Image (cartoon, helix red, strand yellow):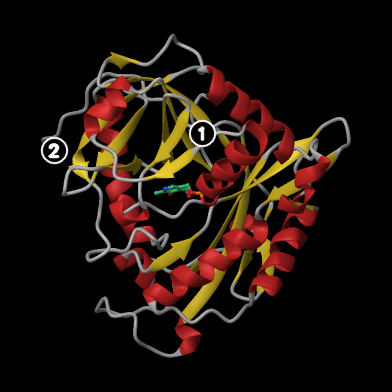
Amino acid sequence: MLYYRPNIPMATVPITIHPYAFLGKEFLKYEDAKISVMTHAFMYGTAVFEGIRAYYNKEQDKLFVLHLEEHLARLLQSCKILRLQPYYTVEEMSKIVIELLQKNKPKSDAYIRPSWFKACERIGPSVIGDADEDSFVVTSIDLGDYLDTSKGVSVEVSSWRRISDNAIPPRAKINGSYVNTALSKANAQLSGYDEAIYLTEAGYVAEGSAMNLYIIRDGKLITSRVADNILEGITRSFIAKLAADELGLEFESRAIYRSELYVADEAFFCGTGAQIVPIGSIDHYQLGDSKAGPITAKLQALYNNIVRGKEAKYSNCLVEV
Ligand SMILES: Cc1ncc(COP(=O)(O)O)c(C=O)c1O
């Protein structure tokens, strides 16, 4: 086969899959949670998902799920856009996620992936069909950092453009749309970078391959507009609130030009999976030194305490397992 496979060591994220999963309407051993190779979602990408994190507090021997309801509400919104017909409410899905974690008993940080998918075996990509064609699956794994959060990562502005609302709506977490992520992330890695930033077709900054983005200029936090084809990130909104309430910083959501990335005082990615990741350089333009800038570092420290249940004021973001 003729394709370029250079000898560059690629950073892969180590995971441990938990022993139980939920599929259809029941808990199963992970190895028994199987679907057919003719599944519509496998053939056409017709599924929606969420990535949720649970944090293990070692001192208290407790596990906390972060922003559970918000993620499950967004999952139903994604179902609506893809015309899937979910048979569980947010409350019912929350109970399933918690019960799954109680069965799996992780003793480290975990990542939970609920997904609604077109489970029928059929040729033709249309999602229109009976309600019993759609199914629900939840898996969980042990997961540490997705990207290194301890230093500034290196980033390229991708030559791949962000999918647009009139093609595959980025507002929905549709499995098939993550081919856009796969292309930009792979290209960045092959070029020796840790991550990618997409521009929109109009040339504005959208987001990272699977995370939102903030830049800091003159003490102000700036993030891309929703109109620039971003996922409306739960962490993105949370950071805006933390920055205003805890650090008294101004916040702006607006069109960002590419060259503003290069002159930013600080920049960081944020997302449930990514957490808060300082950006060290973009297209070889250095931002500060190799570690998190002062505002990024403050937000990181605050975030890390909140997610492990160490800030009573923010305990309403967490569900204890
Ligand atoms: C494309 C994309 N953007 C942004 C994010 C961050 O969103 P959130 O903070 O809701 O996890 C994610 C992660 O889910 C993502 O996949």
Q: Position of residue 161 (x, y in %)?
A: 20, 45
Q: Position of residue 259 (x, y in %)?
A: 23, 28
Between residues 38 and 231, which one lies in front from this camera angle?
231
Rendered image quadrant of residue 145: top right
Q: Residues within 10 Å of mark 2 (few under 14, many from 20)?
A: few
Q: Position of residue 222 (x, y in %)?
A: 41, 37
Q: Residue at horizontal 34%, vertical 46%?
A: 254
Between discs 2 and 1, the one toward the N terminus: 2
Q: Is residue 119 above or below residue 53?
A: below
| Left/right of residue 262 with respect to residue 90 in the rendered view | left
Between residues 97 and 162, which one lies in front from this camera angle?
162
Tally the marks.
2
Q: Residue at horizontal 50%, vertical 45%?
A: 236
Q: Position of residue 280 (x, y in %)?
A: 40, 18
Q: What residue sits right under mark 2 in the picture?
A: 1
| Left/right of residue 113 with respect to residue 217 in the rendered view | right
| Inter-mark Cα distance, 2 to 1 | 31 Å
Q: What residue sits right under mark 1 in the picture?
A: 146
Q: Secondary structure at mark 1?
A: loop
Residue 150 visible in the displayed image:
no
